[in-house]
Amino acid sequence: MATTKNTSYRVHVQDTTQAEVDSVNIENGAMLRTDDALYMGHNGQNVIVYPQTGGLNLGWARYNDTFYTGLGEGDSNKLLLSDGIEVTLPNNGGTVTRSHPSIDFYDVANQKFVGLNENDVYAVTVVFKKSAANANQTHLDFKLTGADDYDRINMALGFYKGNDETQNQHIMLQYYLDANALANGLTPKVTADGGNAKIWGIIFFIQRTQNAG
């Protein structure tokens, strides 16, 4: 006579809060569920087993600056860059759009790109409008600062449309976070070189492409 096996097992998974997930003693195979994700203890970590992608694993956020809009009379709503003076590229995060409410990859108060785990990978797009009175002799130097060796992410940005002409700037960056960058964040810096310049309409689009946690 054939043997019938019951292959349907009901497992009760404890409903809990994210704070408890972060503080509980981890047991291999033990599962916890929050409103956002299902966790399982594995090799000393509570790893997300569902959803495989989304707010807690990957995702993105867009930060629009609403101060330097360029919409006022004259240059009152443009960031004025004096020749040779390095400044933080500002973004007040006046408008933020996220793929998930839990995501925040930019520290508005301290004006830094931030992350969640050491060895996470991030892709960042920075856009703004710019102009310079002396386009032939002026360029912008852009870089990241705040952690050792990250200033290697830098570039020179020219003005190709002529004097006082509005030009769109589009910058794409990709990096992983080491322990230093995770602890200190990364600050976008910009310097006008060869003459004064103006920047406005600043947007940061930040995507987490790999969750090392």
Image: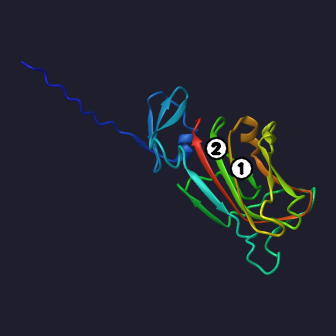
Q: Is residue 201 visible?
A: yes
Residue 29 in picture, x, y percent from top left = 44, 29
| Residue pointed to by mark 1 | 113
Q: Residue at x 72, y 35 (%)?
A: 179
Q: At 59% across and 35% down in the image, what residue appears?
A: 212
Q: Quadrant of the C terminus?
A: top right
Report crowding for label 1: few under 14, some 14 to 19, many 20 or more residues within 10 A (C-alpha): many
Residue ranking furthest to the left: 1
Image position, residue 133 (x, y; %): 87, 68
Is residue 152 shown left or right of residue 14?
Answer: right
**Residue at 66%, 36% in the rendered image:** 118
What percent of the width, then of the height, locates residue 163? 84, 67
Tell me the element at label 2. strand
Give me the C-alpha separation between circle 2 and circle 1.
10 Å
The vertical placement of 178 against 168, above or below, is above
Q: Which label's residue is closer to the chain start, 2 or 1?
A: 1
| Quadrant into which the N terminus falls | top left
The kind of residue on which mark 2 rests is Tyr
Q: Could you say which is closer to the camera, residue 157 or residue 64?
A: 157
On screen, 140 above or below 151? Answer: below
Q: Nearer the viewer, residue 78 or 130?
A: 130
Q: Is residue 105 left or right of residue 90?
A: left
Q: Given this view, does label 2 or label 1 mark the residue nearer the observer?
A: 2
Please determine whether, in this image, residue 175 is positioned above or below residue 203.
Answer: above
CB under 8 Å between discs 2 and 1: yes
Q: Amino acid at mark 1?
A: Phe
- Give the x, y percent position of residue 70: 75, 73
Tell whether 78 sits left or right of 3: right
Q: Label 2: which residue?
A: 122
From where the camera sits, is residue 116 visible? no
